[in-house]
Amino acid sequence: MSEVDDLADRSTARIGLISDTHGLLRPEALPPLRGVDLILHAGDVGRDEILDRLAEIAPVRAVRGNVDGGALATLPMTEAIRVCGHLLYMVHIPEDLDIDPAAAGVSAVIHGHTHRSRLDRVGDVWYVNPGSAGPRRFDLPVTLGRMEVDRAGLRTEIVALAPMGQKSR
């Protein structure tokens, strides 16, 4: 399990959630991430430089996606991070979960892969997909997520970067 600096024991933290950049870090993705304490990239990074650019904003933890090769192939398949007493678990493909999140005491599973944003609660576990922040895929909006964490719980929002109908790369 990864403990990022002092986030495990802090009373509050702000986390940026991003996935499926596929080598494109849009300029409009940067403002919603500014001011966060940690950025979690849920895979399909696409290029090393994406993580470097994100690290200029906040510490970054990332998992490997199915298109991540080269140096990105060394990223872990899963990562558990404790923030404000809550266990967050990252995996790119949700079907590749290698634990029972509820039994493991996980507060949220953060994943990518489908390019569809998701905020679902199953029992006591949140399942969060920030959506795709890279090139538009299919007819889906381009999104990322922000999560506020405190001892009482998690609050997550999906942020549209390029709404439907707007031209995007």
Image (cartoon, rainbow, N blue to C red):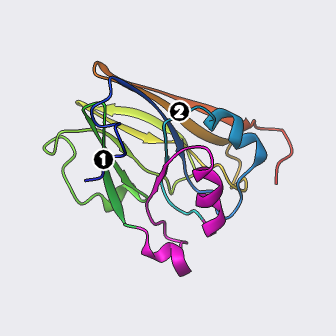
Q: Earlier in the sequence, mark 1 or mark 2?
A: 1
Amino acid under label 2?
Arg
Q: Is residue 27 above or below residue 119?
A: below
Q: Residue furthest left?
A: 103
Query: In the drawing, does residue 154 fall left or right of residue 82?
Result: right
Give the labeled residue for mark 1. 3
* Residue at 65% over, 33% down: 32
**CA neighbours of label 1 inside 10 A, class few (<14), some (14 to 19), many (20+):** few
Q: Position of residue 156 (x, y in %)?
A: 47, 28
Q: Position of residue 152 (x, y in %)?
A: 28, 18
Residue that carries the numbered disc 2 in the rendered image: 146
Q: Residue 90 at what x, y percent from top left? A: 37, 52
Q: Nearer the viewer, residue 156 or 115?
A: 156
Residue farthest to the top, as pictured: 152
Q: Is residue 148 left or right of residue 125?
A: right
Please tell me whether mark 1 or mark 2 is closer to you in this view.
1
Residue 85's quadrant in the figure?
A: top left
Q: Which residues are magenta?
A: 46-75
Q: Are marks 1 and 2 in contact (CB under 8 Å)?
A: no
